[in-house]
Amino acid sequence: MTTTDDISYAISGEQPEKGEPAKKNKARRRAAKGLAWFALLFTAVLVLAEPWLLLPAAALLAAIALWD
């Protein structure tokens, strides 16, 4: 559900269906978790192959941690 959906529901007074977003959110979280693990493992393999690749990987992690 997007912000525009929230706004349209607030204006119209309708309530969204309860079952569907939970399934979408669960699938989205599962996909995000799988993608994160894949990225972590792929980065680990690259760092093992070329240790200097740890620098951009660390910089990326720092940027994500500082993102607000």
Image (cartoon, rainbow, N blue to C red):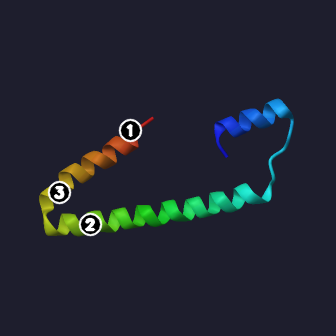
Secondary structure under badge 3? Answer: helix
Taking depth in this image into account, of 52 and 42 the one nearest to the observer is: 42
Q: Position of residue 34 (x, y in %)?
A: 46, 67
Residue at (20, 56) in percent of width and height: 54
Residue 7 in the figure: left or right of residue 59: right
How crowded is the residue under tag 2: few (<14 C-alpha within 10 Å), some, or many (20+)?
some
Taking depth in this image into account, of 16 and 48 the one nearest to the observer is: 16
Q: Nearer the viewer, mark 1 or mark 3?
A: 3
Whole-Å distance between the Cαs marked 2 and 1? 22 Å
Q: Amino acid at mark 1?
A: Leu
Residue at image mark 3: 53
When the figure is inspected, residue 63 is found, relative to residue 58, above or below; the finding is: above
Q: Amino acid at mark 3?
A: Leu
Residue at (19, 51) in percent of width and height: 55
- Where, quadrant-wise, is the C terminus in this rendering? top left
Residue 42 in the figure: left or right of residue 46: right
Residue 21: assigned label: none
Res. 8 image quadrant: top right
Secondary structure under badge 2? Answer: helix
Res. 25 image quadrant: bottom right
How crowded is the residue under tag 1: few (<14 C-alpha within 10 Å), some, or many (20+)?
few
Residue at (15, 69) in percent of width and height: 49
Q: Position of residue 2 (x, y in %)?
A: 64, 42
Residue 44: assigned label: 2
Q: Position of residue 32 (x, y in %)?
A: 50, 60
Mark earlier in primary sequence (1, 3): 3
Q: Amino acid at mark 2?
A: Ala
Res. 15 image quadrant: top right
When the figure is inspected, residue 56 is found, relative to residue 13, above or below; the finding is: below
